[in-house]
Image (tube, grey):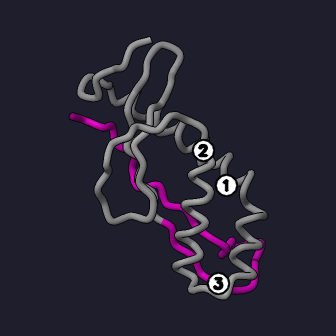
Amino acid sequence: MTEKNAETLSEKEIEDIEKLTLRWIFQAVLDFGMEAYEIFYKSPDSVKDIAEDITRELLDRLSGYNVYQRIYGTVDYKKARYVILPDQTIRQALFIDSKAEKGEPNCNNSNVSNFNVCKTKTCRD
């Protein structure tokens, strides 16, 4: 298995990596959703602080391999990681921001927490 240079990725390959990442995040939200709801509902902290804590807890549970590289940005969660594909390994910088509102749950408008994926980027040296 080889590590592919980020500069040689095609638009299709980048899109495939973003779709895979979104599937991982979606599954993590499903797995952690009820726990996140309880934390959000019971916590006396500010809505912004709770959302950031939940975002970090949820995303730290994502499977994968971290790259020990400092990532700079102003979003709530940022992590450099490897995306392992059947025939190659790709470095990824994952930036995620959390927004939330506290209130009564509503089936038509889930207001527990919204996770916004801020465009995954490939790590370039």
Q: Secondary structure at mark 3?
A: loop
Q: Hey, what amino acid is under mark 3? A: Lys
Q: Secondary structure at mark 1?
A: helix
Identify which residue, 92 or 110, lies in the foreground.
92
Q: Are marks 2 and 1 in contact (CB under 8 Å)?
A: no
- Residue 35: name its quadrant: bottom right
Alpha carbon separation for disc pair 2 and 3: 25 Å
Of mark 2 and mark 3, the one earlier in the sequence is 2
Chain-order first, disc 2 or disc 1: 1
Please identify the residue farthest to the front as the structure is shown. Answer: 68
What is the CA distance from the residue labelled 2 to the residue labelled 1?
Answer: 10 Å
In the picture, measured across the screen, residue 68 lies left or right of residue 22, that is left
Q: Which residue is mark 3?
A: 102
Residue 71: image location, x then y, percent: 32, 51
**Numbered label attached to residue 62:** 2
Badge 3, how many Cα within 10 Å: few under 14, some, many 20+?
A: some
Residue 45 position within the rendered picture, expressed as x and y whole percent measured from the top left: 61, 85
Question: Are the residues tagged 2 and 3 within 8 Å (C-beta)?
Answer: no
Q: Measuring 69% from the left and 71% from the top, which residue is drawn there?
A: 110
